Structures are given as structure tokens and as C-alpha cells.
Amino acid sequence: MNPNSNSYQHQTMKKVYEAAENQKNRAYNERILNVEHGSFAPLIFSVTGGMGRQAKTFSKLLCNKIAYKKKQDYNDIINFYRCKMSFLIRKLVLLCIRGTRGAVKIDNELSNLDDFEFNSFESKVN
């Protein structure tokens, strides 16, 4: 999510994160609860490195458990976690902007298929 985009410029950051969390909840929560019998907490990160409310709660709980298990200082663990997440987000943003480094090979058999035929081929449905 890019909080600096034009669609979010008249909203506070808190509202932007809440809207993104609500959107993820609507999309996935029912399936997770009914089909997979689990729980769901959307982890919303912005391209600038910010976190939504549930992502902050999750990261604090995770780092607290890691610090307890490894018998290390919580501050060191949370700093490492935030640094690692920051680099991962930047790497993903760069990948989305620039694309992959290698050339993409297209199978000759698949290059002449339209979208429906390709999706049918990929899902092995005829």
C-alpha cells in the first residue's frame, strides 16, 4: 500500500491502515474461519515501512516470544525484525517497479493460447 498516493491524500494514516485492514478482512476472514478453521489477522505494511495496528501487535508479540525463547533483549530482537522487514519491503517495491532481472521464457505451446485457454491449461481443466 502506498500511503502517499492521490487516493489517500485527504485521509489520516490511521484511517488508511484501518481501511486496508478492513478490506483484507472482508476478502479473507470468512474463508479462513469456515474452510481452514483458523484465525486471520491482516498484516498491512506500507511501501514506506509503516505498519497497521494488527501488524504492530503481531510484531510485538512475535518478538516478545523470540526474545523469551532465545533469552535475548527484546529491544535487540524488535530492532532486527524492523530492519529485516524494512529491507524486504524495499526489495519487493523495487521488484514491482523494475521487474525481474532475468528474461522470461515463454513456452511455444502456451504462447498462442488466449486467457481462458491458458487458465484452463494451468489449472488442468479441459
Image (cartoon, rainbow, N blue to C red):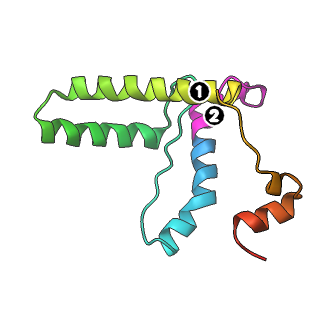
Query: Does residue 80 appear to the left or right of 93 in the view shown?
Result: left
Q: State yes or no: discs 1 and 2 in contact (Cβ < 8 Å).
A: yes
Say above or below: 88 vs 69: above
> Pointer 2: what residue?
1
In the rendered image, the residue lying farthest to the bottom is 126
Tag on residue 47? 1
Residue 1: image location, x then y, percent:
63, 34
The kind of residue tagged 1 is: Val
Residue positioned 74% across, 75% down in the render: 125
Query: How crowded is the residue under tag 2: few (<14 C-alpha within 10 Å), some, or many (20+)?
Result: some
- State the SS at label 2: loop
Residue 123: image location, x then y, percent:
69, 68
Residue positioned 52% across, 29% down in the render: 89
Image quarter in which the C terminus is found = bottom right
Residue 39: image location, x then y, percent:
43, 62
Query: Does residue 37 appear to the left or right of 90 in the view shown?
Result: left
In the rendered image, the residue lying farthest to the left is 71
Q: Which region shows up in magenta?
A: 1-17
**Mark with earlier residue (1, 2):** 2
The kind of residue tagged 2 is: Met
Q: Can you tell which quarter of the image residue 11 is in?
A: top right
Residue positioned 81% across, 57% down in the render: 109
